[in-house]
Amino acid sequence: MNERIEQLAEQCWVHTNEPLFAAKSPHWEFDRQKFAELIVRECASLAKTKSDSIVGRAVKYAEDADEETSAKATAWQFLVFEQEIKKHFGVRE
């Protein structure tokens, strides 16, 4: 499995007060909902990062205003995609 997925999965172990079988002590459970949400947030974050990168490069390297405007329009599409990913999976801000 991808190392980043492993890191996200490690964050999804939650302590519960529900006893495991006949044991009287609490135990740990894997929270699948949290895991799915973390993956969705990670994907949305990639879109945001790509948008920021496009804008940064456009400001630095664009040869004219039209080229910079075009790059910013592309970056905007990545920001919209970030929001669409979250909305599609029901992940709130």
Image (cartoon, helix red, strand yellow):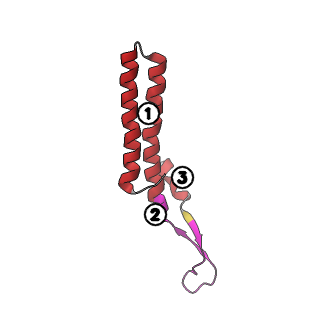
The location of residue 17, given as percent across then percent down, is: 60, 77
Mark 3: amino acid: Gln
**Residue at position x 62%, y 77% from top?**
26
| Residue named by callout 3 | 7
First to last magenta residue range = 14-35
Q: Secondary structure at mark 1?
A: helix
Q: Mark 1 or mark 2, which is nearer the start of the sequence? A: 2
Mark closer to the observer (1, 3): 1
Dots 2, 1 in contact, CB < 8 A: no
Q: Separation of disc 3 and disc 2 at Cα?
A: 16 Å
| Residue named by callout 1 | 51
Q: Separation of disc 2 and disc 1 at Cα?
A: 27 Å
The location of residue 56, given as percent across then percent down, is: 49, 25
Q: Nearer the viewer, residue 81 or 21?
A: 81
| Residue named by callout 2 | 33
Quarter of the image where one finds residue 78 = top left
Whether 33 is among the magenta residues is: yes
Q: Would you place residue 68 above or below residue 7 in this image?
A: above
Q: Is residue 1 visible?
A: no
Mark 2: amino acid: Gln
Q: Mark 3 or mark 1, which is nearer the start of the sequence? A: 3
Q: Mark 2 or mark 3, which is nearer the start of the sequence? A: 3
Crowd rating for badge 1 (residues with CA inside 10 Å; few <14, some 14–19, many 20+)? many
Residue found farthest to the right: 25
Whether 60 is among the magenta residues is: no
Q: Secondary structure at mark 3?
A: helix
